[in-house]
Amino acid sequence: MSNKRMTVGQLLATSGVKSHLSPGDLEKILESLPMYIRNTDPLYIRILVGLGAWVSALFFVGSIASLFFQNEQLILIQFIGIALMTAGITISRINKSLFFNQACLAFVIAGNLLLVFTTGEYFHIKSSVSLVIGQIIVCAVVYPLFNSSIYRFISPVLVAVFTVIWFYDDKIYYLIHLLIAIEALFAGILFLRKKRIRALIPLSYSAAVMLPVTILIMNMMGMPIFRYRHYSVTLWPSSVILVAGLIYLYFYLAGGLKQFKEPWIIIAIASTVLLGIFTTPGILIAIGLLIMGYAFGDKILMALSFLFIPCFLVLFYYSLDIDLAYKSAVIAGSGIVLISVRWLIGLLSKYKVTI
């Protein structure tokens, strides 16, 4: 007898289970499961498929660009981009094998990049805003047509990446705070809704990644290698936005404002405000992902938080334009706050303290 364990997604995909469920019942079950449970392919396989598709797409784009960009044949490049995307979407509906899924993903990503990078030239837009406009249009059109969770995850993230590049190139750094507010609201709407639509689940995880990616790029731009552009932006508006978002999340998960007098929520709010003052917005985002991951039993959100916390600590520490002693105090202070909160909440839970 085999001891190999099956995931819930693999179990639901078997013919024996499908024969006892109507398509409507199966759809309702799948909608209620997180993406990492629903998908029948192991996570490492999906990661390799995505990486392989990206490498293939870059080769496609590189070869096509070398042939046609130098001759400024924009119409032909855009035609090739549309043809690649059409081929990818069509083949994906006919054949569901892993090889064809990867090939279709590479076609669609290559077509996406070709269309986005020619938008500015076609409409004579010199600013990087053309990348944002092109990606939003392509994502809106292709997302409902191409049933690939990897593309549906990557494409919206590219919108955030291109937006930050636009802000940086045009030196409108203050708009990054507006972008963070929009991303936080977007993620909250998608994750905190009572019923999650299956087609929007990849978009939910994409929204969860947009926030840390935006802050990560912003922190990297503050490093000495980028400072020749005179990059300067204060972090406190983003910290205020994220602190407010976390406090709302606490009350939402706790059941409303009636929990305001609970000791644990008072400590959580106080510690969040302190972290907003003394640490980077990235840490606040990682904490929010961790809380939602534990609250919803979502391993992907928890993995994202564990991935980004050390990244933000290292980049924040490196990019701070202060002496080493103060840097050490900031990092140590953040750690003391988090450890103290963990100890106090554990103590309150042990003795069931109430106000």
Image (spheres, grey):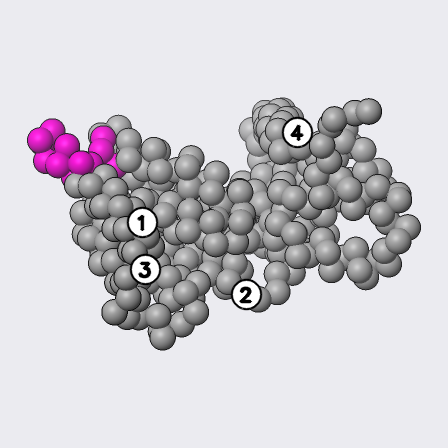
In the rendered structure, the answer to whether residue 91 lies left or right of residue 167 reads: right
Sequence-wise, the earlier of marks 4 and 3 is 4
Q: Is residue 29 above or below residue 214?
A: below
Question: Which of labels 4 and 3 is toward the front?
Answer: 3
- In reply to whether residue 156 is colored magenta, the answer given is no
Which residue does the numbered mark 2 point to in the structure image?
193
Which of the two discs, 1 and 3, sits closer to the camera?
3
Residue 22 in the figure: left or right of residue 252: right
Dot 1: element: helix
- Residue at the bottom extreme? 258
Q: In this view, does 17 lie to the left or right of 226?
A: right
Q: Which of marks 1 and 4 is nearer the N terminus?
A: 4
State which mark lies toward you, 1 or 4: 1
Where is residue 120 shown, x and y percent of the image?
50, 47
Task: Mark 1 or mark 3: name the one nearer the start of the chain.
Answer: 1
Residue at the (91%, 50%) spot, across then down: 19
Magenta region's main secondary structure? helix
Q: Distance between the residues labelled 1 and 4?
A: 38 Å
Residue found 25% across the figure and 69% down from its top: 355
Q: Where is residue 293 in the image (x, y as percent from the top left)?
A: 48, 49
Return the mark for residue 45.
Answer: 4
Q: Position of residue 256 (x, y in %)?
A: 40, 72
Label 3 is placed on what type of residue? Lys
Residue behind mark 1: 346
Between disc 4 and disc 2, whose residue precedes? 4
Give the number of marks.
4
Cβ atoms at labels 4 and 2 below 8 Å apart: no
What span is in magenta?
316-332
Q: Earlier in the sequence, mark 1 or mark 2?
A: 2
